[in-house]
Amino acid sequence: MKIAQEIRAGNVIMQNGAPWVVLKTEYARGGRNAATVRMKLKSLLSNQGTEVVFKADDKMDQIVLDKKDCSYSYFADPMYVWMDGEYNQYEVEAENMGDALNYLEDGMTAEVVFYEGKAISVELPTSVEREITWTEPAVKGDTSGKVLKPAKIATGFEIGVPIFVAQGDKVEIDTRTGEYRRRV
């Protein structure tokens, strides 16, 4: 059993006797109200979507799913095809990819998550290394405190990087938060 505020995107929970994959979570704490977690869910059985609000301390069953290390192969609209070490191919729907789309590149390795033999989502490693394809030049004298500037990687995903990072540099990005970690 996990409490609602510990559930993250990509987790699978049992709700009303059916398995649901969590697509998005938003934690909110009101002034006098109890903290809440708004979850966008998709049924694994019927592919229908819904949005539910839970109290932050509500308990729910998290389903433990099978996982297999695979590498990204190609995109066949609307499926992303992954291949394991034995050359078996698994298709994951675009809407189930979640934040993985921000960091996706050919040959990338990740864990494909299975429910009853069907590939349902992808879990990324906690950090990835990507090259900065675009960023603004540093502004001289703008060094007070922790100053970040926008930068883009090959997928078009934008992150905040320190001013000393230049176009063409490789950086490590935390995939859980989408934040810059360090220059590689």
Image (tube, grey):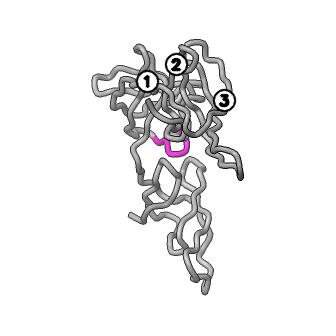
In the rendering, at what x and y percent does residue 58 appear? 55, 33
**Magenta stretch bounds:** 101-105
In the rendering, at what x and y percent does residue 33 appear? 70, 45
Judge whether residue 133 is colored magenta. no
Q: Quadrant of residue 57?
A: top right
Q: How many residues crowd around disc 3 within 10 Å: few (fewer than 14), some, or many (20 or more)?
A: few
As drawn, 51 above or below 117: below
Q: Earlier in the sequence, mark 1 or mark 2?
A: 2
Q: Quadrant of residue 160?
A: bottom right
What amino acid type is highlighted by mark number 2? Pro
Regarding mark 2 in the picture, which secondary structure is present there? strand
The circle on residue 52 is 3
Q: Residue furthest bottom?
A: 141
Judge whether residue 102 is colored magenta. yes
Q: Quadrant of residue 83?
A: top left
Q: Badge 2 is on which residue?
A: 19
The circle on residue 63 is 1
**Residue found at x 58% / y 69%:** 148
Q: CA distance from mark 1 to mark 3?
A: 18 Å
